[in-house]
Amino acid sequence: MSVTTANASAAAPRGAVTARGARPARLTAGRIGLYVFLVMAAAFFLLPALVMVLTSLKTMDEIRQGQIFAMPQSFDLTAWKAAWSSACTGLACNGISVGFLNSVKILLPSLVISIAAGAINGYALSLWNVRYANLLFAVLLIGAFIPYQVFIYPFVRIFASAGMFGTLPCIIIVHTIFGMPLMTLIFRNYYASLPVELFKAARVDGGGFWQIFFYVLLPMSTPMLIVAAILQVTGIWNDFLLGLTFAGGGNVPMTVQLNNIVNSTTGERAYNVNMAATLLTAAVPLFVYFISGRWFVRGIAAGAVKG
């Protein structure tokens, strides 16, 4: 044993498991290439975001100079205030704040219903002997890979016949339907990876379908619930096509109003307001991911290997 390894072992507490191996003595060509690749990948994603932030803090006179990487001369939030409360999103000039409230009203019930339906479906298909379970699961998976555009016209006809087209319940049901295949898949894989002895023991103790779900499996599903929440928040909040088609004029989400701001052809094109509106629209999914990113990785790993 070398002196360095012996000192490291002596310094570590007894019984502790070191998370990393020994630091390499010198940089190899492979490690240098890895660092170069990571830096380039980070720059590829971060530079556009940096340009957006800098542009949103500049005045139009500074933007016209064409120096996109130059720092703003002053910390000016005028464009952010205009994007939130006074930018024109069509005939109305009240910013994207209305779209934010609409997106929240669409997101919350769609998130809860789709995750609940996916968790129950995954639980039933993985641990209960449901007749034709494999066929039902295959149909759900096929639905997950069919493009949204194929379903738009039939859904429009169905909801119009039911008198629901262009309403808030309409867009909530649509997001629930499109989220169910993926939610069922991830929960089915997760519950199938759990020891089946837990389910059998609960059945021996007299637990029924709902008792086992709520008192045994659901408390163990925190990582997967967070994964499902991140996926659904990202998909529902960033949706444009379904919100434009099914939400109706009074319930258009934030993404639709952002499109109206950015693609406006009347008057001066305010790039600082466009960038500020884009960042405000992307803030919610970014915030959700940053506060729960480690749980996302843990949940993905939990459903990847069958125990």
Image: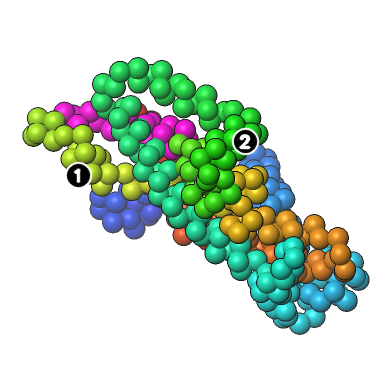
Residue at 55% in and 37% down: 161
Magenta portion: prevailing SS class: helix
Residue 294 vs 302, above or below: the answer is: below
Task: Say whether residue 168 is visible.
Answer: yes
For discs 2 and 1, the disc positioned in front in the rendered view: 2
Q: Say which of 56 and 232 sits in front.
A: 232
Q: Quadrant of residue 127?
A: top left
Residue topped by disc 1: 215
In the displayed image of the protein, which residue is found farthest to the bottom? Answer: 74
Q: Secondary structure at mark 2?
A: helix
Is 214 left or right of 228, judged from the image as shown? left
Q: Secondary structure at mark 1?
A: helix
Q: Position of residue 16 (x, y in %)?
A: 29, 51
Determine crowd level at label 1: few under 14, some 14-19, many 20+ residues with C-alpha closer than 10 A.
Answer: few
Residue 70 vs 292, above or below: the answer is: below
Residue at 21% in and 34% down: 209
Name the residue type under label 2. Answer: Ile
Residue at 41% in and 18% down: 135
CA separation in Å, label 2 and label 1: 39 Å
Magenta range? 181-202
Residue topped by disc 2: 152
Residue at 27% in and 44% down: 218
Q: Say which of 294 and 122 sits in front.
A: 122
Q: Are marks 2 and 1 in contact (CB under 8 Å)?
A: no
Residue 202 vs 275, above or below: the answer is: above
Is 307 left or right of 48, judged from the image as shown? left
Task: Say whether residue 67 is visible.
Answer: no
Residue 14 vs 266, above or below: the answer is: above
